[in-house]
Amino acid sequence: MPYGAKNGTVNGMDFVSFGRGEDALLLIPGLGDGLRTVKGMALSLSWLYREYAKAYRVYVFSRRNALPEGFTIRDMADDLKGAMDALGLRRADVLGVSQGGMIAQHLAAAYPEAVGRLALAVTAAWANPTVQAAAGRWAAWAESGDYGRIVTDTAERMYSEKTLRKYRPLYPILARTGRPRSLDRFLIQARACLGHDARGELGRIQCPTLVLGGARDRVVGDVSAELAGLIPGAERYVYPELGHGAYEEAKDFNRRVLDFLTRGR
């Protein structure tokens, strides 16, 4: 596979690794991980994040496969640190997206020795009213087994109108394909989002941090200024015309993150 891409499992967590660099980069995906883990996705993820492959050995981690009821964002951060220890990763740079950014906040605050540089994309410091509205709806639909509404509402909240014009004709197909055998894992992760509040912990983050947001974000809100303001010395960049899907839609997103993470090398 390209860039030495591999699929693996550690401590009950699926992960993908790839890249030629000596330093480690952890990529923590968002709530969509509750619908499908990264198992078997080494080829596609190594291509999607190929810009990082020369500078890093990249690790894309899912949450553990069997999530207990009441599992929190902080628990997920502790799991991730355990996975790092099991793989011998003493220190890594970190990119967390959406719920992955919530996990990354707790990881950097609780284990400052483990995080070198930190990028937090389209995420929030706490479960504000916008997060409550979005994740609350998804949790309710997961309880009722309505996978189709989760998929279509997620797209409508994430993407710009330009991108949605391409996706909307595919909604009937997307609503019928890719459904997991159970929505319980997604429901537990959605509830974890609803209980997220790292505001009291963010002042403990010691590493250089970049916060990236979308001004039209309908999943977490336009809250990058609040988040950056709670992290000592954090930098911030906002995509004014994009929303929660900025990490997919902005052509310069990965390059912007990579430039920050490798600054001063």
Image (tube, grey):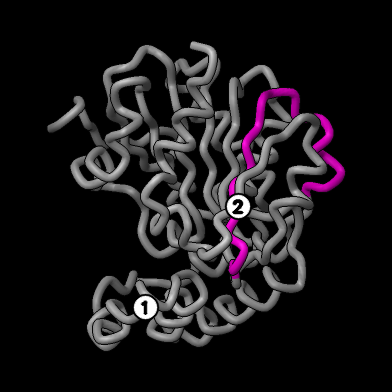
The structure residue drawn at horizontal position 37% and vertical position 75%, both measured from the top left corner, is 162
Task: For label 2, count other residues whose C-alpha is less than 10 Å away and answer few (under 14), some (14-19) or many (20+).
Answer: many
Relative to 219, residue 44 above or below: above
| Residue 76 in sight here | no
According to the image, label 1 marks what residue?
Answer: 164
Residue furthest out toward the front: 240
Element on which disc 1 rests: helix
Q: Nearer the viewer, residue 235 or 97?
A: 235
Is 232 on the left or on the right of 93, as rendered? right
The structure residue drawn at horizontal position 58% and vertical position 29%, both measured from the top left corner, is 81
Q: Residue 149: x, y in percent?
A: 44, 85
Residue furthest out toward the right: 200
Quadrant housing the N terminus: top left
According to the image, label 2 marks what residue?
Answer: 238
Relative to 40, residue 206 above or below: above
Relative to 106, residue 36 above or below: below
Front label number (1 vs 2): 2
Element on which disc 2 rests: strand
Q: Residue 233: x, y in percent?
A: 77, 30
Q: Nearer the viewer, residue 38 or 202?
A: 202
Q: Amino acid at mark 1?
A: Leu
Sequence-earlier tag: 1 or 2:
1
Q: Amino acid at mark 2?
A: Val
Is 153 on the left or on the right of 105, as rendered? left
Q: Residue 240: x, y in percent?
A: 58, 61
The structure residue drawn at horizontal position 53% and vertical position 28%, both measured from the top left corner, is 260
Rendering quarter of residue 181: bottom left
Q: Nearer the viewer, residue 265 or 104?
A: 265
The magenta span reads 198-217
Q: Which mark is residue 15?
A: none
The structure residue drawn at horizontal position 50% and vertical position 55%, both measured from the top left corner, is 30
